[in-house]
Amino acid sequence: MNCPFCGYHDSKVIDSRDVNDGVRRRRQCLSCSARFTTYERLQPVSLFVIKKDQRREEFSKDKLLAGLRKACEKRPLPTGAVDKLADDIEAELYHQGKAEIPTTIIGDMVMERLKRLDYIAYIRFASVYRDFADITALKREIDSLVTDKTEVSRPTSQLSLLPNEELVTVAKGRPRSRR
């Protein structure tokens, strides 16, 4: 490690600490005694994404984050939820150990996680990802959310518009009772 002050080629490590994605090292130059910090992290093996038209491009977490942020825009989600979602997806992709992954797998992973995180973000993402041909296809997807038996945890700041009983009634096409 070259000293950033004098350019000398050798330094000694004074302190090492684990940080989020690597190691932080405090170093001292053996020539000028200046101290500086370096960060070391593993560089994962390149991961390529196979697009729908069979083109291949390197996986970009920034692109994944951009899509997630667009879907979750103006939603009452906890701070860091979108970044954590992207980190989880990226980790799972690298954990699979494959050099190439189709975009459909990444899209399905995003859909699955967004469905658990926030229904509106899920529908926003699905409308672009699934490229619904018409409004009836979108309605079918929304209806499947309403009739789905699994309970999705909502952020504490997000309230349900209707009680569950009324939501099921509305989904079946029956008019709501006026109070």
Image (cartoon, rainbow, N blue to C red):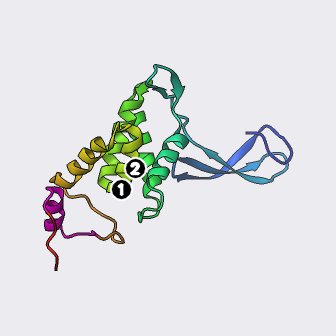
Q: Quadrant of the N terminus?
A: top right
- Judging depth in this view, the residue of 140 and 173 nearest the camera is 173
Q: Is residue 117 left or right of residue 147?
A: right
Give the class, few, some or many, for how many residues have Cα within 10 Å of label 1's Cα (few <14, many ≥20): some
- Res. 118 visible in picture: no
Instruction: Estimate the x, y position of residue 67 in percent, counting from the top left.
Output: 48, 45
Residue at 74 percent across and 44 percent down: it is 11
Instruction: Estimate the x, y position of residue 30 in percent, counting from the top left.
Output: 79, 46
Residue identified by numbered label 2: 124
Residue at 40 percent across and 38 percent down: it is 129
Q: Is residue 64 left or right of residue 177?
A: right
Secondary structure under tag 1 reads helix
Indicate yes or no whether the magenta region holds residue 161. yes
Residue identified by numbered label 1: 120
Residue segment shown in magenta: 160-174
Q: Are marks 1 and 2 in contact (CB under 8 Å)?
A: yes
Q: CA distance from mark 1 to mark 2?
A: 6 Å
User: How many callouts does the rendering have?
Assistant: 2
Indicate yes or no whether the magenta region holds residue 170. yes
Give the class, few, some or many, for how many residues have Cα within 10 Å of label 2's Cα (few <14, many ≥20): some
Secondary structure under tag 2 reads helix
Q: Amino acid at mark 1?
A: Ile
Does 18 appear above or below 167? above
Q: Quadrant of the C terminus?
A: bottom left
In the current view of this chain or complex, which residue is farthest to the top? 54
Instruction: Estimate the x, y position of residue 87 in percent, counting from the top left.
Output: 45, 47
- Judging depth in this view, the residue of 109 and 2 nearest the camera is 109
The image's mark for residue 138 is: none
Q: Amino acid at mark 2?
A: Arg
